Image: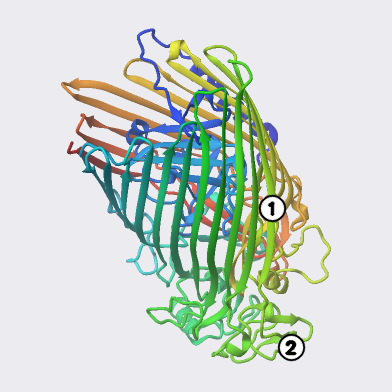
Amino acid sequence: MMNKTEKCGDSRIILAVLMLSLAMPIPIHAQELEEIVVTARQRSERLSDVPASITAFTKATIERSGIERAEDFIFQTPGVTMVNTVEAGDASLSIRGLNGARDAETNFAFIIDGILYTNPSAFNREFTDLQQIEVLKGPQGALYGRSAASGAVIVTTGKPTNEPEASIEASYASHQSQLIKATASGALKQDELYARLSLDYRDTDGHLSNNFTDADTVNDFNNYNIAGRLVWEPDAALSLDGKLRYGEVDAAAIAFNASLALPSFAQAFGNAAFFEDANEHEFVFSPNVDPGNEQESLEASIKMDYEMERATLTGWLLYSDVEQFFVADGTSGAFGFYFTDASCRSTTAALAGFPVQSPNYIGATPELPVSLFPPYSPTTCDGYQYQERNQKDISIEMRLTSADDQRLRWNAGFYWLDLEREVGVAQLLDDGRTALPNSFVNPLTDALVHDRFDTTVYSVFGAVNYDVTPEIEASLALRWDREEREATNLVPTPSQRTSSRINYCSNTTYVPPGVCTLDGVALAGTPLNPAFITNFATGTVTDSIAPRSKSFTQLQPKLSLTWDVDEDWTLFASWGIGFKSGGFNNIGSNATIQQFLVTPGATSGTDLVAPSDLFRKETSSAFELGFKAQLAQGRMNLNGAAFYTKVEDMQFFEFFVGPFGLLRVVENIDKASIWGLELGGSAQITEAFAISMGASLIEGEIDENRVRPNTVGNEIPSAPAFTFNAAGQYIQPLFDGIDFVGTLNYSLVGKTWFHTVQDNVVPAVLFGGPPADFSKTRRDAYGLLTLRAGLESDTWRVIAFVNNLTDEAFLEEVIPAPEFGGSFIHPGTDRIYGIELGYSFF
């Protein structure tokens, strides 16, 4: 494990490189840097005037850096990292150590053209027609609500134009990867009614192959989107902006391997694979179930801006409907759940030469060592999993904003959201058929959590910015949120169950078909979800689960102070409260974990305490001190910040795996503290050459954690100790109207733990309690280099590109499952090279 001395050493090296690079002499003839205008505080302001840390990408930077999806600009933002491994709509950001918990609220506000999108799936999309991206770090709940605990991502896209515009872009890259984007814009009625249409199509085979079928890839991806925008401006005061977008994704899911952390098994079997460094794992993908992930999304919005004499009235309405599911091989192969099933016996016999005879791990004759067939194996013994996450929401905001050209500037408004979300995870028998059912309840279903979550949000907010003196601005923003949540169980009751096939109701007793017992006592029914079991000692089963409801409220203030020391230097300080609403896990999650994964009567600090079906709201108190400077007569800028955050009930997402299949659970880390430093800047070195760099250092610690008490003192999960970004751009005229353009981007991500269990030893309950050592589950640091070079004019461009130029091998995510005694790991992308063509018709 990297100790604090090692982390400080790496941090000092990164800071030294950054400062020395930005201290390079700048020739007097170099041009000034472009002044960037942002909308982080819901009004247009110079970037240097906003009392917050912001990484901004202009249209020119977006095009020349090849930014097309969220990960493209996140990897160029210091202090921010992203993971997207499970399915298309399941991206998670870590911003200054605050993480987005899957199946909970996002930890950042996502705004497109002034409208707040609440569906987590909305972020991980194709970004077409981009004009600007702003990544705002630090709590922004006072302006953007309960989803902005760690920051905001503000995206501006192309607005319909009065004059005709049209462009097309196409690229072809390795792994049969293709991308096409097209945009057309113009006036339907001159100087009054304008329209814009854009579309995109992406397709790739992916870089991972199925070694079992020799035909199927395991990370293929295909999607398309069509978006239309209509703006009506009948006079100088009123603007109505309507948007409609439809998209579909047809991709793969769950490209994971299992990496075990069982040193005693490694010693007993003489097989190092039982206890390996996750970073040194040799990936082999051989599922017999071809993974599939489908998503269908529809978004419609309308936004109004009405200029009055002393203020602007802004209002918008958004409707969003995203439906998605995935099907993939299961995780239960190691637990003997399906060992007597005929399909399991035949597929293992075909692979090993003999069928599985017993569910026992060791000692059966003949015996099949568990290591031969891990999760996602070519046998049917691991079953398969089916998951859905569907969300419909409608939201409204009305806001009144004062004019900019006055000493006292203010805004005030209200927000309302109605959201319906359906989430389910099923474990099913794989009986060897070619087409497995894509549904929750069918004759193959063995275990299921499935619920509808209804949410209503009411918010009122306001902000005041006051120029105390010409050089000093004081700001106060305040927001009150109330969130009403309800969870309704959708799992069929025991009396509704149409199949009495296998139901595995005990972690100690194997149950033959048609029987369900607990500790040898027959149950009255065969519930798919342990939440129906009201008494585990007697096996009493109920036929109903009552809906659950809870309301969460929070006042979110933010104070800021900005001091323009002189024309070149600005200092700022801020304090704010961040808030993420509490909510419900799938009903039955707590009962399942209690039944299968909690050791009865255990009191050791290494034992798991089952998370509740209700997770608490997360609140944070964040302080920031920073500076922004314009140097070398406008040809260089420099910015930096120090921050400190105390977090109460930090939400942390965890996968639990066992005979029940897979559970997705949000739990709370009771207390945590985070501090860090950021430094960045950019410089126009010559007329042709510009550079930019940024570094972030984060130190986070778990102060209290009732779910896993032995993790106190460990680092915050999913927060790398440091990130470093550097970019260089070279533009040199070659011929009349034709330039050579070259860009080089480098991103370095430090070592990262992804779980609260880190350099810890805990009992592997599912294997009978042997020690599981997770000291080898931290992801190693990695750096990615991207090169783009080619020719461009005012109307066309031809660019060759290479992503991951050095073909760096790295892990994208490590998902430890302590009670399983191992982790699920996902590889990062390999080197990708291709060519891009673009043409503007007007």
Name the residue nearer the viewer: 307 or 210: 307
Three-letter code for the amino acid on which mark 2 is drawn:
Gly
Marks 2 and 1, how far apart at CA: 46 Å
User: For mark 2, what is the residue?
Assistant: 520
Residue 236 placement, left or right of 439: left
Can residue 567 be seen from the camera position used here? Answer: yes
Q: In terms of secondary structure, where does tag 2 sit?
A: loop
Q: In terms of secondary structure, where does tag 1 sit?
A: strand
User: For mark 1, what is the residue?
Assistant: 553
Residue 148 placement, left or right of 832: right
In this view, the residue farthest toward the top is: 28
Residue 246 placement, left or right of 608: left
In this view, the residue farthest toward the left is: 736
If the image is split into quadrants, where does the C terminus sit?
top left
In this view, the residue farthest toward the front is: 309
Residue 516, x across and y down, in percent: 66, 88
Name the residue nearer the viewer: 480 or 660: 480
Residue beneath the point at 66% across and 82% down: 544
Residue 206, x across and y down, in percent: 35, 55
Name the residue nearer the viewer: 169 or 225: 225
If the image is split into quadrants, where does the N terminus sit?
top right
Residue beneath the point at 61% across and 25% down: 466
- Above-or-below relation of 67 to 359: above
Whether label 2 touches label 1, CB < 8 Å = no
Label 2 vs 1, first from the N-terminus = 2
